[in-house]
Image: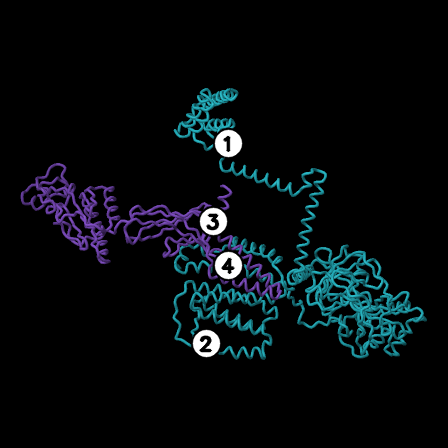
Chain colours: A purple, B cyan
Amino acid sequence: MASGARLQKLLHPGILVRVTNVGLGFILMTLVVAVAATNTGNNGLYVLVSLFLGALVVSGVVSRRNVENVTVELDGPAEIFAGVPVRFTLRLTNRGRLPRRALLVKISSAAAPILFGRLDPGRPAERGVDLVFPRRGRRSIESLLLYSGYPIGLFRKGRVHPLSDERLVYPAPANVPYVPPDPREAEGGDPRDRRRGRGAEIRNLREAGFGDDPRDVHWPQTARQGKFIVKERASEEGRDALVVLDTYRPEGAGAVWDEVFERSVSEAAGLALRLLARGSRVGLLLGDLVVPPGSGPAHRRGLLRALALVEPAKEPGRMPASIPGAVAVYRAGRGPERAA
Amino acid sequence: MSTGPPAAPEIPFLKERLLALGSLAFLAPVPLFFANALELAVLLAYLGVLAVFLARVRRGRAPRLGNRVLNLAGLLYVPIIFLDVRFGSQTLLKTMLHLLLFTTLFKLAAIRKERDLSLALVLSGLLFVASVSTSFHYAILLYVLLMAFAGWSVLVKWALWRDLSGAPEEWGRDLTARSLPGRGPLVTSVLSTVLLAIPLFLFLPRLKAPYVRGAEAGREITTGFSESVDPDLFGALKQSDRVFLRITSEEALGGGAAAVLRLRTLALSRWENGVWKKPPDRSAAGARSGFGALVPLAPRGAGGGTTMTIDLTPIQTRYLPYPLLGNALRLSEASFRNPGHAWVERDASRNLRLSFEPDRTIQYAVTYGTRPIADLEPGDVAGARTPTGSSALRAFALSRLDGIDPAANPESAARALETELRTWTYDLDLQPRGPNAVEDFVLNRRKGHCQTFATAMALLLREVGVPTRFVTGFLGGELGAFGKYVLVRGQNVHAWVEVWCGPARGWVTFDPTPSIGQPGLETVPLAQRFRQVTDGLEFFYDRFVLSFGQADQAELLRKLREAGGGALSALRRAGAGVSPLLRRLPAAAFVAAVLLLLFLGVLGRRGLGFSWKTRGLAPASATYRRLQKALHRLGAPLTPASVPAETLAAAAALGPAAARPAEAIVSAYLRESFGGLASAAGEEGRLGALLDEFRSAAGRSRAR
């Protein structure tokens, strides 16, 4: 390291220093004893002043060393939903040669500190931390504050550890407050026209053949006809579903509108996830943004990502009054409504 | 104003903090009793109440006094203070300490907020400060060390408890925090603090002379060195084992040097009503001499000889003891609070009187020879001749002179009486004997201690017309446990007689005490060395801690400067015959420092990876590194971190003959390092040949 850089590190070490109340009291007492020693010439008081000053120096050096050469990492899951506690792992590694003691980590200024009583050199210490992100969108823990009052609490020294990873917080999936649309009604066709599959709807009844699943036996018809009759189910796959969300925020709309909008986003997320779980191909229409119907894990993440980032629009979108194929329409400022 | 019952917000770690705080508050005032700053009853009452309080806290039933109780206690304490000042303490210090103890107890019992805890901590700190500032015994240093360990341990946890006040559950989650601070860090931290404190103590600016209360101040001592000495009372000192003097000499004081240790303090020539007194005439025979100046110890005194340094503890006298063989005395500058007001004057009886009565250990140096300097000045010889008028004493004296004419031969007369008295019995019986004690001693008892013998001899000689002086001082001592020093204790206090033997002989010293009563130079048995060690510690603490002042700082700095200068001179002398460079030591030191920095820089670069090291590398990588090194020597700006493209470019610049083997080496290196292909058998030889080919081609290219 260049000497200039070393000097700069020495002068601006990036260590935050705060004199605590105890430290302030200690310094004041040192001053008082120093004044008394000077005025009286009492060497007993000089002994105390010397010890107090020595303790100040030792405390300052030790407290600084204690927060140096410690790396802080925060690992968490890829999928985070707003308002849902997520377990992160906080990992501290001591890169120095001496143990570190009484380290505290704060993830946010309002959060309670997390204590690491002792950190041995080279041996990482981990603690599980439950974090809750209250709002959807791009959220990042910009930094972690590592601090300590060790050894005797005269100073509280700390170091801010920047974290570069940004987390995308998905909207909390809310329960859909109405019955999901009937597939036949949504598609407007007979289940018999659809492919065979493992859906809930019965596509056809036929005589059983080799390879049929015994669970598909239709026992009433079997009893009635005297031969094994099985249910042929319609497939849910291939059924496109579109969740529509009007993002236009009228001028003058207030907090109530914002609250309803956020609830709509959460319900849209809940509905989309539910439909995907049923095997539907789900698409989104968010104002001007269209996410074509699809399925699979990548598409699921895409849907959640779109819902995580959707913002109220200042201009009205081109959303028609009636959208064929839509399973749910969320109108601006109102609750969800059944598709037309 | 009283308010209702206190709201009790839960303070995190209250029990732990109260126990920690209580232990500090328990220890803090203990030394006050030993320093006589607190009565035992008060201290015991305080400790008793605190012990009960801590027991209740331990059981989880910490008392929490309400405002009404506090206000009532405050009001009640007003008359207590009045009575305390009026009838109890009689000193403001004790009253203030009582108030401090009272406040500490009530504050501990009325913790309601975080701030109350801090305040109680401060109160304990004040008690600790009071203890240290009022104590004058060396054991206080051990106490300070103990409190440093206790205080450090408490503060470490205190800091953590405070930081965890928002999340107290964390204290239970990480159990390693409970073992804080740990033995190793605690010892290291406290010892580092103490080591830092030593130079701070030595060099913190002293604007005032040290405030010192003598070790025995406030306690009555019948010193025997005042200007009025009652021989009946004198013997109290003989039973004391307190160290009065500490003598360090340039030469060893053992064996035959015992004669050096007869130290004369005060000669008294008037005998009035059974008490020795100094004559009222205080006119100084010699000029006053301030510190640093030589004080001749006799009118014909001359400097020179061996030097001894005497440290004199306060013995309630202004007279300085000095060896009978001494010839000059010099006060040490470091010993005096205000050197401008310190001087010594020698009176007509050769007593050395200081301008003030020291209340702290002072130091002075005395030069001495092998024989005492004759004191030919008669001084108060008239007063020294006055007889008591006792016919019994006169008759006894004459009976023992065996025809010697005391007027014609006073020295022989004195010698005869001295010989007679020395055959009597030495007894340290200290009972007062009344107005006829001397007659009783001479005629009946014939048993006594040194003062009895000296008084008897002085008065017997006076009855036959020989002037005498009664002399008090010290005889002998105890060889110290360390170094060349002698401790002179209370039992070394001694008395003898000086006899006027005419203008030619002057005052001659006689010691009538039987030899068993003459303390000598003793070597204490091993079992008693511990006492010497504690005495040494006490002396050290008294001299170098309590009495440490501005003059000591100046002396210390002078010694450091001299030591530095001495070392520099020694280096210069050593360098004079070796090299002219060493004669210019500062310049040489500068050059050496620059070279050292350059060396460290090279080491640093090597440490950062700027190294052509090939040991441990696979064959192709090692050959590649050698290729880079060869190119670097040929002037290519390459480092071990240079990428293969740079290496190839540098090789290509030397011509196609050099580039071809270089390319082969680089491709082998890439295969080995990045392709994961192990080198084939014989690859090392092939690569070596390629490197040789490159070197020869590069050499040819360079030659062209």
Q: Circle 3 sits in a helix, a strand or a loop, which is it?
A: loop
Q: Circle 4 sits in a helix, a strand or a loop, which is it?
A: helix
Chain that bears disc 1: B
- Kindly identify the amino acid type of the residue bearing the numbered disc 3: Pro
User: Is any part of residue A96 visible from this angle?
Assistant: yes
Q: Circle 1 sits in a helix, a strand or a loop, which is it?
A: loop
Q: Nearer the viewer, residue B578 or A64?
A: B578
Instruction: Specify the quadrant of the image occupied by residue B378.
Output: bottom right
Q: Nearer the viewer, residue A10 or A55?
A: A10
Instruction: Report the disc number at residue B153.
Output: 4
Q: To which residue does mark 2 refer?
A: B71
Q: CA distance from mark 2 to mark 3?
A: 51 Å
Q: In the image, is A56 to the left or to the right of A233?
A: right
Q: In the image, is B179 to the left or to the right of B578?
A: left
Instruction: Report the disc number at residue B613.
Output: 1
Q: CA distance from mark 1 to mark 2?
A: 81 Å
| Labels 1 and 3 within one chain | no
| Labels 4 and 1 within one chain | yes
Q: Residues within 10 Å of mark 1 (few under 14, many from 20)?
A: some
Instruction: Specify the quadrant of the image occupied by residue A281.
Output: top left
- Kindly identify the amino acid type of the residue bearing the numbered disc 1: Lys
